[in-house]
Amino acid sequence: GGELTRTNSTEGCWIATLVPIPWIWAIYYNTPVSPDRLRGNGIAFLLCCIPLPFEEHRTRIPGTNRFPHEGDGNNVLTYDNPCLNCGMTNDQKSGLLTCRICIGCGGGGGEGEIGGG
């Protein structure tokens, strides 16, 4: 593996989808909660037309840039790059693609990484 991605560098608006068949995709805003935890708020679209609003939390698998959903261990997003990432679900049956569409506003607010800067 490479260097660990700082969660502060993932803040912003992202699109995520399954590949190769994008039967579900989401647009969401990532907020760092700690050096190893992210919160995402957004809308997922099932079959490209059924909107499903969500809030989720993801905790880093130690020593990696992989962040599984706290309620679904198979749903793992990888953040090796601050702009575009491709990873796999935990069961290796589907790819997961994430693409940043805007960088976070980063107004502070007391949350985020300890020792960031």
Image: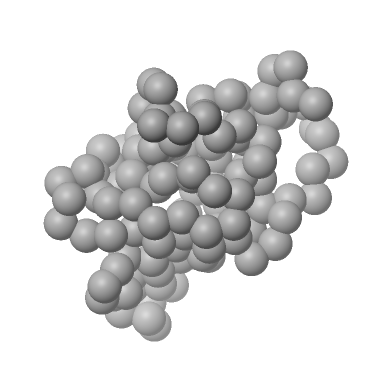
Q: Nearer the viewer, residue 101 or 45?
A: 101
At horizontal 80% and vertical 32% (from top left) the residue drawn is 109
At horizontal 80% and vertical 26% (from top left) the residue drawn is 117
Left or right: residue 7 compared with residue 86: right
Residue 28 location, x and y as percent?
55, 58
48 over 52 or under it: above or below: below
Q: Is residue 17 visible?
A: yes
Which residue reaches farthest bottom?
A: 49
Residue 8 location, x and y as percent?
67, 36
Left or right: residue 115 compared with residue 32: right
Which quarter of the rendered picture does the N terminus lie within?
Answer: top left
Residue 18 location, x and y as percent?
31, 65
36 over 29 or under it: above or below: above
At horizontal 82% and vertical 34% (from top left) the residue drawn is 108
Q: Is residue 52 visible?
A: no
Left or right: residue 57 compared with residue 29: left
Q: Nearer the viewer, residue 109 or 66?
A: 66
Which residue reaches farthest front?
A: 2
Q: Which of the 4 image quarters holds residue 103?
A: bottom right
Residue 21 location, x and y as percent?
26, 75
Q: Nearer the viewer, residue 108 or 83?
A: 83
